[in-house]
């Protein structure tokens, strides 16, 4: 059994009276790719936002490297080595591509050049456009930039909220192969997707989230052939 | 053309000078708006307070001490206002913050009224600035010449800070997206404080230049310049620093030409002095109708 980097226990997230996450538990083993799939409004983003402190969880434990970080503020959480590639990319439109990467390394004071080079290696297109404002990039390029920006903090755990959203199938394949490459470099990945097919074939472990509850879990490959999952999420 | 310039040189010079003073104040409005989407109604009163601080401190201290002291105290005032009156309302509706700003504005004016007893206080003459100089036949105070130069230098320094430093980059990031900035590990509150510190510092510099020309400070001395500088910021496109600077110069120059330009258009002159204020607000109405986003403004990207 490998070491667990992130362990969620009975996490609840409320918005006013709405229960978005109704007590979920799951583990993310260090070095793995774990995916959380689910339909619109299932509570996927809320889960990630609670982990990174953008919303305060109502209750539950979020243990990162053995320490409960639930309710701590975002700066504190991010400084521990967690990063989130947010839903909708959220790159800074006025900052150049290079500045977006620099801002990703905001908390570091050491030399960022090797990391910039690595990101440019992963995404050569970003290198060509390094002096262009982020807002002028295409959707796919913006997603690449959002991933690159997240890498700049040298995360231990990278969480991604629907990186394939709105992208052409070819670009989606690119992004997923790069996710694997990043993972090979030792970054643990927690991936949220509606593109269940891609996500489950990439992930070591998958969880299915339905209206705030985890209803199924298993190895990615197993869920991929599970009849219930197929019917609900794979459209076959 | 040359004749025209020559004949009206003193008005144009004082227009450029007043424009520079307005620019230093307008930057504070536009930067705070850029980052918080807040019209900081108290900004003009912070400017007035800087004037009063100078009056009271220079009664006992030499100018070389009071100038840096006023700069520091104004910066502290701006910082404290943000922490006490705006920060607690970070997640409140924007209207609440606006009302808090209006409250601070009146609080400062009332405090000033209490301290001054409502009397106009004579502004100390800052030796070198009050000296008279003659340029091309027009005599004027040194401050008239110093202001545009100093303004330009400060604006360039500010632009470099915003473009090339880490905190400048953070300011640009925060002004677009609080939440994502937080994800990058940026301390939003620190960045906002820096913005208020810069704005207050520039207002303090502006007050020294402005009051050197006006000779006295009253509790409402900040209202009119404050309002005009806000108009300048809107004119330039609120949120844009170059916009605010250019807007301020346009307003400063235009109002002085109206005051003194009897020989230009056949109207104007001293009888039109009151009209020069009306001009500023007429300009505001025209911009709002013709180009609501101002000269350099972006389409309003209302952020949460
Ligand atoms: N800020 C908010 N205020 C109120 N309700 C919210 C808020 N954010 C999310 N919700 C609600 O919480 C529930 C879960 O939302 P969440 O964004 O976590 O879903 P999701 O699984 O990420 O969906 P999607 O795939 O559409 O992004 C939804 O019913 C949503 O309406
Ligand atoms: Mg979502």
Image: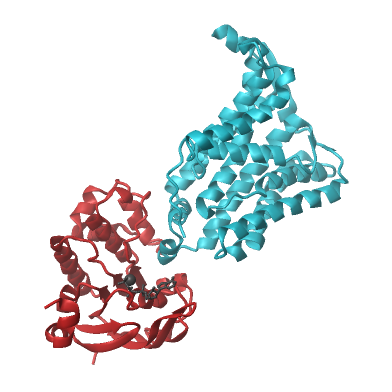
Q: In the rendered view of the protein, which quadrant contains the N terminus of chain A? A: bottom left
The residue lying at 27 percent from left, 56 percent from top is A142
B302, B46: nearer the viewer: B302
Relative to B230, B183 lies left or right: left
The residue lying at 55 percent from left, 45 percent from top is B30
Up/down of B106 relative to B293, above or below? below
Residue B65 shows in this picture? no
Up/down of A153 relative to A206, above or below? above
Residue B200: x and y in percent read 63, 48
Residue B33: x and y in percent read 54, 49
> Quarter for ligand 2?
bottom left
Residue A179 shows in this picture? yes
Relative to B159, B23 lies left or right: right
Q: In the rendered view of the protein, which quadrant contains the C terminus of chain A? A: bottom left
Say which quarter of the image contains residue A194: bottom left
The residue lying at 15 percent from left, 75 percent from top is A197
Residue A57: x and y in percent read 45, 81
What is the display colour for chain B? Answer: cyan
Chain letter corresponding to the colour red = A
A90, B64: nearer the viewer: A90
Residue B90: x and y in percent read 56, 63
- Labels in figure, total: 0
Say which quarter of the image contains residue A25: bottom left
- Report the coloring of the rendering: by chain
Up/down of A105 relative to A210, above or below? above
Up/down of B108 relative to A17, above or below? above
Say which quarter of the image contains residue A182: bottom left
Residue placed furthest toward the top:
B3
């Amino acid at each position: 059994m490998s070491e667990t980097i992130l362990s969620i226990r009975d996490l609840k997230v409320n918005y006013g009276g709405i229960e978005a996450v109704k007590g979920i538990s799951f583990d993310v083993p260090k070095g793995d790719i774990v995916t959380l799939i689910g339909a619109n409004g299932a509570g996927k983003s809320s889960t990630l936002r609670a982990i990174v402190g953008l919303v305060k969880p109502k209750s539950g434990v979020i243990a990162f490297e053995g320490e409960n970080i639930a309710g701590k503020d975002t700066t504190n959480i991010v400084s521990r080595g967690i990063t989130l590639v947010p839903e909708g990319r959220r790159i800074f439109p006025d900052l150049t591509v290079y500045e977006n990467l620099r801002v990703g390394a905001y908390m570091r004071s050491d030399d960022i050049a090797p990391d910039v080079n690595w990101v440019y290696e992963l995404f050569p297109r970003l290198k060509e456009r390094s002096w262009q404002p982020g807002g002028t990039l295409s959707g796919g390029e913006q997603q690449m930039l959002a991933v690159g920006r997240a890498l700049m903090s040298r995360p231990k755990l990278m969480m991604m909220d629907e990186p394939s959203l709105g992208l052409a199938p070819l670009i989606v394949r690119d992004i997923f192969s790069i996710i694997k490459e990043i993972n090979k470099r030792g970054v643990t990945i927690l991936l949220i997707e509606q593109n269940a097919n891609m996500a489950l074939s990439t992930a070591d472990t998958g969880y299915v989230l339905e209206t705030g509850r985890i209803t199924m879990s298993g190895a990615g490959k197993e869920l991929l052939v599970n009849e219930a999952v197929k019917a609900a999420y794979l459209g076959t | 053309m040359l004749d025209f310039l020559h004949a009206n040189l003193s008005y144009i010079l004082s227009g450029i000078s007043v424009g520079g003073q307005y620019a230093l104040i307008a930057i504070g409005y536009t930067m705070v708006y850029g980052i918080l989407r807040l019209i900081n109604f108290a900004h003009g009163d912070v400017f007035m307070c800087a004037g009063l601080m100078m009056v009271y401190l220079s009664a006992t201290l030499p100018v070389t001490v009071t100038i840096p002291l006023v700069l520091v105290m104004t910066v502290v005032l701006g910082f404290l206002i943000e922490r006490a009156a705006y920060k607690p309302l970070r997640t409140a509706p924007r209207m609440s913050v606006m009302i808090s700003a209006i409250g601070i504005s009146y609080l400062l004016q009332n405090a000033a009224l209490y301290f001054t007893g409502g009397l106009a206080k004579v502004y100390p003459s800052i030796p070198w600035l009050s000296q008279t100089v003659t340029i091309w036949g027009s005599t004027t105070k040194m401050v008239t010449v110093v202001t545009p130069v100093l303004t330009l230098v400060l604006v360039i320094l500010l632009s470099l800070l915003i473009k090339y430093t880490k905190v400048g980059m953070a300011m640009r990031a925060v002004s677009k997206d609080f939440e994502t900035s937080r994800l990058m590990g940026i301390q939003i509150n620190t960045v906002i404080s820096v913005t208020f510190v810069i704005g207050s510092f520039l207002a303090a510099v502006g007050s020294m230049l402005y009051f050197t020309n006006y000779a006295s400070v009253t509790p409402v001395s900040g209202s009119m310049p404050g309002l005009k500088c806000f108009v300048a910021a809107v004119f330039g496109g609120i949120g844009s620093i170059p916009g605010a600077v250019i807007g301020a110069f346009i307003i400063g120059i235009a109002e002085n030409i109206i005051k003194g330009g009897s020989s230009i258009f056949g109207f104007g002159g001293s009888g039109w002095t009151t009209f020069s204020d009306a001009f500023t607000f007429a300009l505001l109405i025209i911009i709002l109708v013709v180009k609501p986003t101002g000269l350099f403004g972006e389409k309003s990207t209302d952020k949460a």
